Image (cartoon, helix red, strand yellow):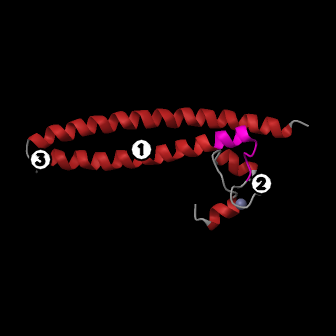
Amino acid sequence: MSNRAEGSGVARAALERRRADVAARVDSLRRELDAVQRLRSQNSDDDEHDPEGATTSQLWSQSSGLLADAERELSELDAALSRIAAGDYGICRQCGGRISSERLEARPAAALCIDCARRQGR
Ligand SMILES: [Zn+2]
């Protein structure tokens, strides 16, 4: 019976695809934030009440929020990949029960079963 090994192979492929997507998003958000920062430092030489200033700081907080989300997801994906390597992928970190395959399909990086995730409000 190789069900278990096949299952984790599929999960690893999904995680690695997802990780590549998220890593690309982290890269492009970092570049975007760099550009916004350059724009802001240029603007601060001019008028502090420049309406452009408000726009760039809005852009800044929006992009840095997205970057924080993407970085969090990236570390979740890395943790899931190392759980696959350790052989305890799909096991709830909280209660030690099995995480359902439906949940893992929807959220391959899930570290908690649906019950524990609900209890934690995630
Ligand atoms: Zn659990």
At 73% from the left and 35% from the top, the residue drawn is 10
User: Magenta span covers which residues?
Assistant: 80-91
User: Is 16 within the magenta?
Assistant: no
Q: Which residue is mark 2?
A: 98
Q: Which residue is mark 1?
A: 67
Q: Which residue is mark 3?
A: 50
At 15% from the left and 48% from the top, the residue drawn is 51
Judging depth in this view, the residue of 69 and 94 nearest the camera is 94
Give the percent coordinates (x, y) of residue 73. 53, 45
Secondary element at tag 2: loop
Q: Is residue 106 above or below residue 32?
A: below
Q: Are marks 1 and 3 in contact (CB under 8 Å)?
A: no
In the displayed structure image, the side of residue 49 where residue 19 appears, left or right: right
Q: CA distance from mark 1 to mark 2?
A: 31 Å
The amino acid on which the numbered mark 2 sits, given as a three-letter code, is: Arg
Secondary element at tag 3: loop
Q: Residues within 10 Å of mark 3 (few under 14, many from 20)?
A: few
Give the percent coordinates (x, y) of residue 1. 91, 37
In the displayed structure image, the side of residue 67 where residue 11 appears, left or right: right
Q: Is residue 9 above or below residue 75?
A: above
Q: CA distance from mark 1 to mark 3?
A: 26 Å
Which quadrant of the figure has residue 112? bottom right
Give the percent coordinates (x, y) of residue 74. 53, 41
- Within the displayed image, which quadrant is ligand 1 positioned in? bottom right
First in sequence: mark 1 or mark 3? Answer: 3
Judging depth in this view, the residue of 92 and 46 nearest the camera is 92
